Image (tube, rainbow, N blue to C red):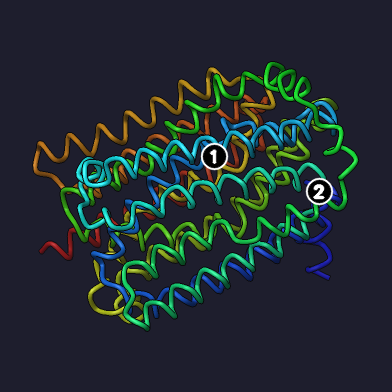
Amino acid sequence: MHGVSLRAKLRGLTGSDMLRDVLKLVSGTVGGRLIALAALPLATRLYTPEDFALLAVYLGVVGMGGVVACLRLDVAIPVAHDDQDAAHLLVLALLIALTFTTLVLIAILTAPHALAGLLGQMRLAPWLWMIPPGILMAANYSALQFWATRMRRFGSIAITRVTQATTGAATMLVLGWAGIAPFGLLLGNMLSTSAGGLRLGREALRAYSASLRRVTRPGLVAAFRSYRRFPIYSVPDALANMAGTQVPVMIVAAHAGAEAGFLLLAQQIMTAPMTLLGSSIAQVYLSRAPEEMRKGQLAEFTLGILSRLMQTGVGPLVLAGLLAPSVFPLIFGAQWTRAGEIVAMMVPWMALQLLGSPISTVMYIADRQRAMLALTLFGGALRVGAVVTAIGAGRDLVSAFVGSSVVFYGACLLVCCRAAGLGLGRGERRLLIYLILILGAYGAFQAISSGWLAT
């Protein structure tokens, strides 16, 4: 009876259609994430923290390239005015991504050692050639996934997530067992974010061939002009957001070596709840929020999403932070103890990101791209500046990165809530009080524990 009541409450908050869509995405995402997590204890015994530090730099470059390779026209696909506009945006995104990665490949072939030196990782020089295909595959998958999101083919997206995890984990473990490092680690992670694109592409051609056949050169030009606000505002926004996350890690790798590997493992573990729940709800939120806004129900819809995330997501993060310092050496090996300590520090950051990230697309739906750009630029400058300042002051780089991330994601959550029309009503106040109590108690516990450990 209780299970029926809980399901009915979720349906009341989000609607039965959204519940079905979320369950489809979560089922695939859970399966994929469990496969990836199960592979990590083996990977940490096949690859060293220095290999993971190299991977952190590679993922940073590919991540920053991947989010801008389509000039963010992929993000416009779900909110396009009609299916024909969406088809033109899909083709535009794929063509622009191909052009972008070709230019990146030329730059890498021209001066690989200079680029590796600029990144502070000369060990990466022999593997720089993997960056262009990594960017292209990630960009293509993103465009096709947004197309599938528009068409609400969430079952197909769920299948590709399992495919990604299986392919990536198998590649990483087999090549690691064969001693082909760090290539196996890099290739496995490349496939874990891009495999499945061919499936989505075949489905798009088969099910929506009529719309794609009507794509014309004048139509591509017209679509670019109509949606030019995405390249103008969303590209700097996305790049600043990704740079704010990845550049500090790359700086840590250049100045502290293996510390970046520990940080990467900690991030992979702590982003699991967001991958399992947050990203799935984010995609469905994006597909439903424009309709809710037209009906004047966006604030209630958004509050329901935040309440559900608070109830289901923050608790596992807190539990992970409490257990990580003692559990990490047992699961991943004694050399990864530091990663467990970093996990404990990251809980407030990840809790705020879990709440804010799924609803962040409201800034585009509400046509507040400039505000989002300003916020993201602030976040990028804050986090990079904090790490650079820590270098000069001789302080812990990871702590500086984590602390500045807490401030940034707290600001993001507040701004997105305002954009969605949330105020200080009874529901909002109750949610805020719960969040403050949980994170405040956790922070006090960690401070006391650290003091005891220090003495």
Q: Tag 2, which secondary structure?
A: loop
Which SS class for mark 1? helix
Q: Is residue 451 left or right of residue 326?
A: left
Q: Contact (CB < 8 A) between labels 1 and 2?
A: no
**Residue 255 visible in this rendered orientation of the protein:** yes
Question: In the rendered image, which residue does mark 1 sit on?
Answer: 432
Residue 453 in the image, given as x and y percentages of width and height: 17, 65
Above/below status of 208 relative to 186: above
Q: Number of labelled discs?
A: 2
Residue closer to the observer: 38 or 318: 38
Q: Amino acid at mark 1?
A: Leu
> Which residue does the image show at 49% across and 41% down from the upper left?
101
Mark 1 surroundings: few (<14), some (14-19) or many (≥20) residues within 10 A:
few
Q: Position of residue 13 (x, y in %)?
A: 78, 46
Residue 45 shows in this picture: no
Instruction: Determine the residue positioned at 43% across, 78% down.
Output: 173
| Comparing labels 1 and 2, the label whose residue is closer to the camera | 2
Mark 1 to mark 2 CA distance (whole Å): 32 Å
Would you place residue 166 above or below residue 412 in this image?
Answer: below
Which quadrant of the structure image shows residue 305? Answer: top right
Task: Read off the residue under disc 2.
Answer: 152
Relative height, residue 167 to residue 71 (above, below): below
| Residue 217 pos. (x, y %) | 75, 24
Three-letter code, disc 2 = Arg
Where is residue 160, by image quadrant? bottom right
In the rendered image, which quarter contains the C terminus? bottom left
Q: Is residue 400 left or right of residue 21?
A: left
Locate the N terminus and report the quarter of the image it occupies.
bottom right
Mark 1 or mark 2: name the one nearer the start of the chain.
2
- Please tell me the numbered disc located at residue 55: none
Check disc 2: other Cα within 10 Å, few if <14, some if 14-19, many if 20+: some
Residue 262 vs 375, above or below: the answer is below
